[in-house]
Image: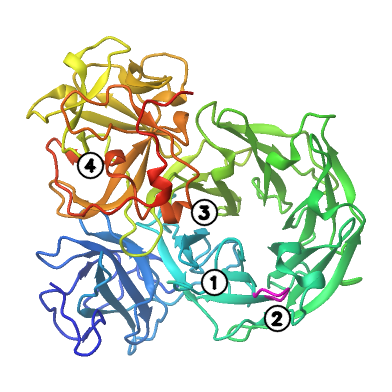
Amino acid sequence: MWIRSAGRPCAPQYERAGLRDDAPRAASSQLDLTGANAPPTAVVRRPAAVTFTPATGDTDVAGYRFAVADQPGTPASWVPANRDGSATVAVTPVSDDPFLGNTLTVVAVDRAGNASTQVTYRFLANPATGSPHVRGDVTGDGRAELIRAGDIGNGQMQAWALAADPAATGFVGNPVAGWDAGPGSGFTAARTTVVSGDFDGDGRTDAGVLHDETGGRTTFMVLTATGNGFAAPSAPQWDSQVVGGAWAYPSLKVAVGDVNGDQRDDLVVLANFGSSWRISVLRSTSSPGSLSFKTELWATGISPWTSVKIVVADFTGDGRADVGELFAVNPMTTRLYVHASRVPAAFAFTDGVLWWESCGNCWDWGRSNPVAADYNGDGRADLAVFATYDVYQTKLWLFSTNATGTGVAAPTVQFDSGVNAWWGGAVEPTAGDFKGDGKTDIGVTYRRPGPGQVQLLTFTSTGTGYAAPVARWTGAMGTPGTGAVAPDPAIRYRLVANHSDKCVDIVGAGTAGGTMVQQWTCIAGATNQLYTAVPVGAGFYQLRPSHVTGMCLDVSGSQLGTARCSSSGPAAPTAPATRSTRWSTWPAGETTRWSGSGLTTPASAWTSPASAPRTVRSSSSTAAGAARTSRSTCGPEPSPQAAARYVERSMRWILGRNRRLRTLGKRRDKPAWRRRCESSTSKD
């Protein structure tokens, strides 16, 4: 299917003029990809929507690599494809030169990693109207992007951005991986912290990477924003050069802000000295195209480093970023101190001033995830805290800074997920003005079960608080072949046991609660074997049998059956919210085809969070009527990345649209950790 270059299998070939049969296509209503003119929507630094589609007959496109420059470039930015093989992406013009113009270079990649013929499109753009400095703005158009960095396994990290739509209040297409450290690079979550800030002062937010070089040595490098991705340097711009001691990576906490008001962000480092700490600043002395930092000591403290969390933002409203210190007096009592920037009097922070203290034993510091955000646009940062509660519940609290920049009002709840909904440990917050109205919104990456599975959401500022979260994108962030498992609630699915090719069947098409579930020969048109997957938030779904209204698949004790659906799902009957009717999807490693879309995507194991780490399964039997009540207990399991390489066949369920779809994968021997799974009915 793909054209491979001689001597280098899978390497893309370059096709400048015309389209080869295997070359992807690109289309846009905002850019003239013929290069004839520059429509008003084509502006340098302003993202425009472009849709990539596969060549005719290509049914296994995993995504596309692309580049934008004033001449043909090497495609490096990655965007995952939708189920139909298409992908809509934000393409940001970089040149207003009418002679050079802009060149979009695109290559399609299949799930095996093979590349198509490379194709280019030329387009023109109008000059930019300015270079606003907006927190989180990767493209430079005055609106922040949703930025996320993640460990995708194999010693490899990626930095992603979902571009804000300059003509609306939403976002453009799919997120783009603008940086990939590469497999085996040593950039893992345990050894790497990725932050964002405009370190060179060019009006675009870069990605900063603090990395543990082992042996107590730490480095910091800036991936400069290009508008369509991030450019990695040949070497870090800063190196501690110290083995052990104050710069050992495990002893550092970092945040970013412009501490001296020079329109360049700096890295603030909180270092552990046992019963005390110190704050150093890697102060940016950079300019566009030239990155450099000066290390300076700005503050010290005598409280334990392990009891301090920091955020950096301009709380006092003087144009210089301060340090907000969330301090644990004890595990259930918390204080907020602010260390104000003393520039220009000195390159230093003041001693901490107490701005707020919780009541005794009523605020869990360890379950608090803070982010600074100026929600009302008054020039003084406020503090937002995502707090985790028991039973899968998360709340967003807002501390409003007063008009004099000397304290905060009592916190108010802006969002309450309710029980059995959001797990706070999966919430990764970031702040940015996504609408370009001068008020800071909050973006959240919610990590879903399964390698690379995430949901991107935003809490939009109303000027007086935050609106309810809105889901912006759901899918997989990873290398080609990392499948996104996001069922369509408008489609009815069969759940087919991978090992037996039999369907999950509601016994006798029963309609009463507590009706048992079995595996049975798949029958065309049998509605008691068809299910809709209704999203209920945070990557969870209710599985509703099609033959009855208001019932869901449910785990009760050690039995799998039906029960009334919880009230959290759309149009669900009123009933207490319960985790036992909530399910998530997990890529299982083998490949199946989605009917009607022509796209291959990994098989999915449906798992119930109520029974974690148990997995609802059929028995190893292939007989009809088997596995009415069985589920297994597995463990201890390896990392999610390792577990994704193999999921026991009797735990795999193929999702098919109305009719069963055959697996293309092959069975492999079970690793030791899977052989330990119990095949008998497990007990709570």
Q: Residue 572 at x, y = what percent?
A: 35, 19
Relative horizontal placement of residue 627, taking residue 277 as reference (left or right)? left
- Which is more N-terminal, label 4 or label 3? 3
Range of residues picked out in magenta = 213-218
Q: Is residue 325 visible?
A: no
Q: Nearer the viewer, mark 1 or mark 2?
A: 1
The amino acid beneath tag 1 is Gly
Relative horizontal placement of residue 141, taking residue 306 as reference (left or right)? left
Q: Residue 428 at x, y = what percent?
A: 57, 49
The residue at 43%/56% (across/down) is 642
Real-space Cα distance between discs 1 and 4?
Answer: 34 Å
Residue corresponding to mark 4: 654
**Is 424 placed above or below 349 here?**
above
- Which is more N-terminal, label 2 or label 1? 1
- Which is more N-terminal, label 2 or label 3? 2
Give the camera-side residue of 267 and 379.
267
**Would you call the spot at circle 1 few (<14 residues within 10 Å), some (14-19), or many (20 or more)?**
some
Real-space Cα distance between discs 3 and 4?
Answer: 38 Å
- Whether residue 399 appears in magenta in the rendering, the answer is no
The residue at 7%/30% (across/down) is 524
**Residue 31 marker:** none
Residue corresponding to mark 1: 186
Q: Secondary structure at mark 3?
A: loop
The amino acid beneath tag 2 is Asp
Residue corresponding to mark 3: 434
